[in-house]
Amino acid sequence: MIRISYKNLKLNLVVSIMSLFLVSTGFASENDNLELSKQASNSKKVSFHAWGGSSAINQYIQWVATKVNEQHGIVLKHVKLTNTSHAVSRILAEKIAGKNEDGSVDLLWINGENFSTMKKAELLQNDGWAFELPSFVYVNPKKMPDTIFDFGIPTGGLESPWGRAQFVFGYNSKNVLVEPNSAVKLKNWIKTNAGKFTYPQPPDFLGTSFLKQLLLQLVKDIHVLYEPASASKPLDILVPLWEWLDETHPFLWRNGKKFPLSNSHLIRLLSDGEIDIAMSFNPAEFSYAVEQGILNQDIRSFIFEKGSLANVHFVTIPFNATSPDAAKLVANFLLSPEAQLQKANIRIWGDPTVLDIQKLPAKYRKQFKMLPAHPAMLNAEELQNIAAEPHPSWVELIEEEWLKRYAN
């Protein structure tokens, strides 16, 4: 297994390592014949545990359920989660209890922090199955390294890329005339527009992501964030973050004494005019909300000028899944050009594809180019200004220290 030190991370080094990794792991080619339908013959039911906090995402998963039922006879059950860690805890409890078969989770939508936890605890199918999916032929890890590195950790084919997430701000352009596109500019804007900004309370994923986005702007040596927190003096590294928050909290919505508990609550505050700037980890969320009439037509988006936090999200199969072969069929469909095109449509979900469009058949290349655009969403070129996720070990520390300082 290849390990990368992010201390002196350079693009050419990453590309070189990717090239070696691609040769050594044997990714699926278009001619691979895996006969996934035969693999799934033992069971046709798949329990898909995935976040259920978005009506758009829920409707998309129902569309997927219809498709895999039509194509493979699979009955896909969406188990709606409020927090992915709940499913991880259940899988861990089953392992401790010795339940090595017939587990409750067949397929799990996962992020980097939980992948790290599950990988260390050996809670995953360990056969590198994701690299053997026929649809993986359309993935290009050289162009998008995060499809095989999750929060800097090699996936080893233990999870399959599903979509891209990127941290964006959404704002009311009638009230915000100049985008505060840096940590310093945002701080100054907050202090001159008291009560018009807030963020979800950590450990909410979006709230923690906002803190990481700030930290990437504020830390002097960004490379330390790509090493385990234990490799440095982490409390010293976090000091600029707490200084920023200490200075801005008195000027937040509800004077920083109360925080939204979810992304949907934050969007509602923006819709009601209680705040003028919100945030999302989906670049299309604000355009989708405008299309649905949830937000008004004046909403626009921006990112920090030094780059916005971005990552790839995945699906994985637990070690004791009841229907692992059928789960692979579902994962393969989720990665297919058909499903990725549907997901990328801002009128359906708007989650950016993990596929290399240039590798797709001409039919799909044309359809991707014809996807609807929206004034509330940044274009593809603007969204290329990204900052990679810090090492997952920083998440727990940031959340613990935040709760000590600011939780009521």
Image: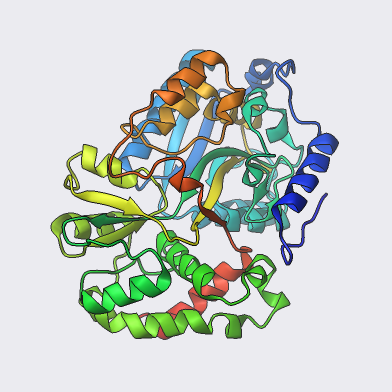
The residue sitting at 37% across, 80% down in the picture is: 407
Along the horizontal axis of the image, is 24 left or right of 262?
right
Residue under the image location 44 percent in, 55 percent down: 167
Above or below 253: residue 299: above
Q: Is residue 267 above or below residue 364?
A: below
Residue 173 percent location from the top left of the image: 21, 55
Q: Quadrant of residue 140?
A: top right
Residue shown at the point (34%, 70%) measured from the top left? 186
Based on the displayed image, in which of its 4 quarters is residue 79 positioned? Answer: top left
> How many discs mark residues in the rendered view?
0
Question: Is 323 on the left-hand or right-hand side of 164?
Answer: right
Percent coordinates x, y for residue 198 in the rendering: 29, 69
Comparing 54 with 298, the one in front is 298
User: Residue 163 location, x and y as percent?
Assistant: 51, 39
Q: Can the viewer see residue 109?
A: yes
Please report the residue visible at 69 percent of the width from the left and 69 percent of the height from the top: 228
